[in-house]
Image (tube, helix red, strand yellow):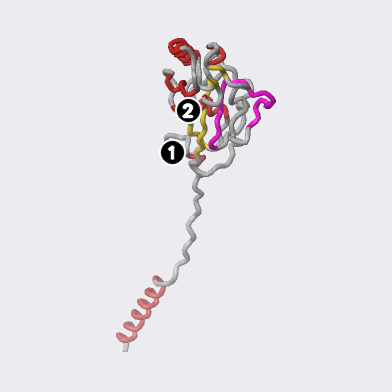
Amino acid sequence: MVALSVLLVVAAVLAAQHFWTGRTQPVSAPEMVRSAPYEEVEGRPDGAATAAPPGAPASPAGAVIVVDVSGKVRHPGIQRLPAGSRVSDALRAAGGVRPGASTEGLNRARLLVDGEQVVVGAPAPAGVVPGAVGSGGSAAGAAPAAPVSLSTATVDQLDTLPGVGPVLAQHIIDYRTQHGGFRSVDELREVNGIGDRRFADLRNLVRP
C-alpha cells in the first residue's frame, strides 16, 4: 500500500508538471516600424535617410518631367528633371546660360510642367507680358516679334534666334554669300550646324 501511494503521488506530480509547461503563453504584437519615403533616402549615397527640402512639392516616387531647353544655353536640347523642378533647374541641367545672354523675361523660380519649352535670349513678341506662359506651356519670349530675313540679317540679328549663336550665325551668312542668298527657308537645312531639330525650331521664325 505504501509503495502504491508513493507511485500515485509521483504520477500526480508529473501530470501537474506536464500540464503547467504546456499551458498557453501570452505573445506580444511586434513593434511597427515606419519605412522612410523615397524622397528621404534618395540623396544619400550610403542609403541613410535624409529629410526632404523644406517646402518641396509632394510627388510620386521617381516622377520625371521632360522639357526642351533651347536658345542661348551651353547644351540646348531635351532635359529630364525630377517633378517639381523650376526653370533655374532646367537652365542648370543645360549647362547654364551662355556669357552675355540675357535672362530678362524668364521667371527662373517658376515651376516647370511636363512637355514645355524654355527659350533663353530671344526677345518677347509684341504684346506678350514677360514671364507669362502660353497655352502650349512655352515660356514667353520664345520667338522674335517678326520673321528674320535670312538674306539680309546681320550676325547680331541672327543671334537672337533660339539655338543660334555667333558661330552658327556666321555659317548662315557664309552660306548666303556662297549661294547668292536664300531662295527658300528649306535651304537653311544645308547650312553647316543646322540639323532637323534646329530647323524645326527656326523655320517659322525666318523668311528667305
Disc 1 + disc 2, Cβ < 8 Å: no
Magenta stretch mostly in which secondary structure?
loop
Q: Observer-nearest residue: 79 or 134?
A: 134
Compare marks 1 and 2 and give the one earlier in the sequence.
1
Is residue 7 magenta-colored? no
The reply to whether residue 51 is in sight is no
The spot of residue 127 in percent (x, y) is 69, 25
Residue 150 image position (x, y, % from top left):
52, 17
- Magenta residues? 114-133
Amino acid found under the numbered disc labelled 2: Gly
Q: How many marks?
A: 2
Q: Which residue is mark 1?
A: 47
> Tag 2, which secondary structure?
strand
Q: Where does residue 46 sit, x and y in percent of width and height?
A: 42, 36
Instruction: Identify the disc placed on residue 77.
Output: 2
Name the residue at 48% across, 31% down.
79
